[in-house]
Image (tube, rainbow, N blue to C red):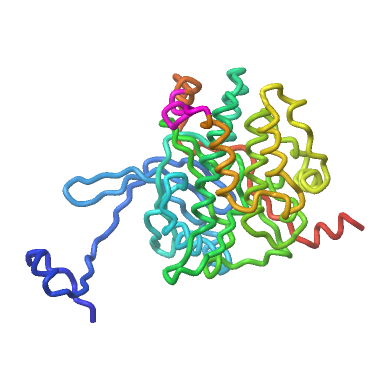
Amino acid sequence: MQPKLDLQMPFSQHCRNMALFTIESEFRYEIVRKIIEGGMGVVYEAEQHGARNFVKRVAIKVVRQNYTDQNNFVNNFVGEAKLVADLIHTNIVQTYHLGEVRGMLFIAMELIRGVNLEQFAQQLTDKRCQLPKELAVFITSRVARGLAYAHSKTDKDGKPLGIVHRDVSFKNIMVAFEGDVKLTDFGIAKARGFLQDNEGEVVAGKADYMSPEQADFQITDCRSDLFSTGVVLAHLLLGYNIFKGATAEESRQRIMSHSIPDFRSLDMRIDDRLNEILHRALARKVEARYSTADEILYDLEHYIYHQGYGPTNETLGKFMRELFVQSMPPVFAESKGSTQILERTARIRNKV
């Protein structure tokens, strides 16, 4: 039986004993308000209370009661928590704790004071403001940094986990008012040993951000996320998504067949080099695409920093605060659009 830590014993003595100890403690959370409500779960802002009046604001993601008896969903919810708990990176929303209260599962995670890119883009439209080209590239480069870290993550034995996010989209990219960019929601990610997956029969994600192979029910790897990253960059630059259709099915078809434009003709700010980056990221043939997130990260950062100075978190934070002055919305405010789940049989019927 593993001994417990005797708090009366000097810590130095514990170290000399070279024994393993555990500290038993209880996490106490008090719900402050509801942040967002989805079909399968609810996210709240909460206060985590500790000893001596310690208080930390966190976000709490809770499984809806009617999903708690669905084993596949519950297993994936737990798998997501275990996977992301070890993804500790400045451009990924941090997970703190997986808990269960009276059969209700929840994840405590980092609270981001900011908005997702859907809300960010809507504010740009409402204010009739154009996002500077350099900031569009900067935001995308931070997403690439988070992906580079996640894609290269290994288990405790050094074996690659093979993480593929599979839902890199405006909805799942947060921008804090301080200028930090955070990738979130690994709920449909693919990773060895963590989440159940039936890829090839079911495809989940935002249809207008999918890679062609993902939209076509094929097996994906990290290069799928890089296509989605290219869609994010193009959307930030142009102010609209060139693949978005009237329905999820139309968006999926456009992802697979819509011609990739010369972006220089769509926005005069886009020069030859940026056009090349976009076309390589959006290459439909996987072999012609960026092969790693590190590669696209290098090109994006070289593009904005090769002259010696470029945007920083502080630059983006200043832009954010000016954009949302006097109207800074609550963290994780409800977003438009949602993750779709498409079954392979639906695609077959549409082809007949």
The residue at the far front in this view is: 307
Q: Nearer the viewer, residue 193 or 264?
A: 264
Quarter-wise, where is residue 57 in the image? top left
> Residue at 82% of width from left, 41% of height from top?
258
Q: Nearer the viewer, residue 70 or 159?
A: 159
Relative side of 261 to 15, left or right:
right
Relative side of 135 to 2, left or right:
right
Quarter-wise, where is residue 18 in the image? bottom left
The stretch in magenta equals 307-318
Q: Nearer the viewer, residue 164 or 349?
A: 164
Relative side of 94 to 333, left or right:
left
Up-down relation of residue 50 to residue 272 (above or below)? below
> Is 148 contained in the magenta span?
no
Q: Considering the image in quadrants, where does the C terminus appear?
A: bottom right
Quarter-wise, where is residue 349 in the image? bottom right
| Percent position of residue 246, x then y | 78, 38
Relative side of 47 to 305, left or right:
left
| Percent position of residue 247, x then y | 77, 42
Up-down relation of residue 261 to residue 63 (above or below)? above
> Residue at 47% of width from left, 47% of height from top?
92
The residue at the far bottom in this view is: 1
Q: Considering the image in quadrants, where does the N terminus appear?
A: bottom left
| Percent position of residue 153, x then y | 49, 60
> Residue at 41% of width from left, 31% of height from top?
178
| Percent position of residue 340, x then y | 68, 50
> Is 310 contained in the magenta span?
yes
